Amino acid sequence: MDYDDELLEKHSVVISGHQTSVTLEKIFWLELKKIAKEEGKSIKSLITEIDEQRRTNLSSAIRVFILKRLKE
């Protein structure tokens, strides 16, 4: 793992008509993009799906989603 993988990146996204920002480590953004591409979805639509199912803050929900996906 590269040092850069641990750096936090903040991205703005519009979910359900409101703009929010999500902060994740670079390695999670890269994996989220990969999953979205595999599923033929945009990052925005994938984050929206995660947002609709979450029970915690959005950044944590995305990390858990990615971890579960990698464990499949």
Image (cartoon, rainbow, N blue to C red):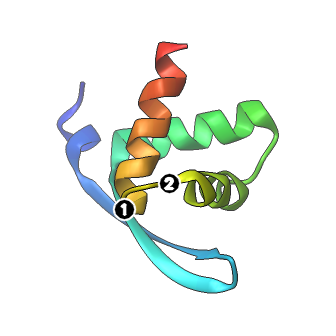
Can you tell which quarter of the image residue 59 is in?
bottom left
Classify residue 60 as left or right of residue 71: left
Name which residue lies at 17% across and 37% down. Answer: 3
- Residue 33 x, y percent position in the rendering: 59, 43
Can you tell which quarter of the image residue 38 is in?
top right
Above-or-below relation of 70 to 28: above
> What secondary structure is marked by label 1?
loop
Callout 2–callout 1 Cβ contact below 8 Å:
yes
Spatial CA distance of label 2 from label 1 is 7 Å
Name which residue lies at 67% across and 62% down. Answer: 44
Nearer the observer, 38 or 59: 59
Name which residue lies at 42% across and 28% down. Answer: 67
Nearer the observer, 38 or 51: 51
Q: Quadrant of the N terminus?
A: top left
Q: Residue furthest front?
A: 55
> What secondary structure is marked by label 2?
loop
- Residue 2 x, y percent position in the rendering: 23, 31
Total marks in image: 2
Q: Which numbered circle lies on residue 57? A: 1
Classify residue 40 as left or right of residue 55: right
Q: Residue furthest bottom?
A: 18
Name which residue lies at 72% across and 38% down. Answer: 37
Residue indicated by mark 2: 54
Q: Residue furthest top?
A: 72
Q: Residue furthest right?
A: 40
Q: Quadrant of the C terminus?
A: top right
- Kindly identify the amino acid type of the residue bearing the numbered disc 2: Arg
- Kindly identify the amino acid type of the residue bearing the numbered disc 1: Asn
- Label 2, residues with CA under 10 Å away: few <14, some 14-19, many ≥20: some
- Label 1, residues with CA under 10 Å away: few <14, some 14-19, many ≥20: few
- Residue 46 x, y percent position in the rendering: 67, 51
- Residue 21 x, y percent position in the rendering: 43, 75
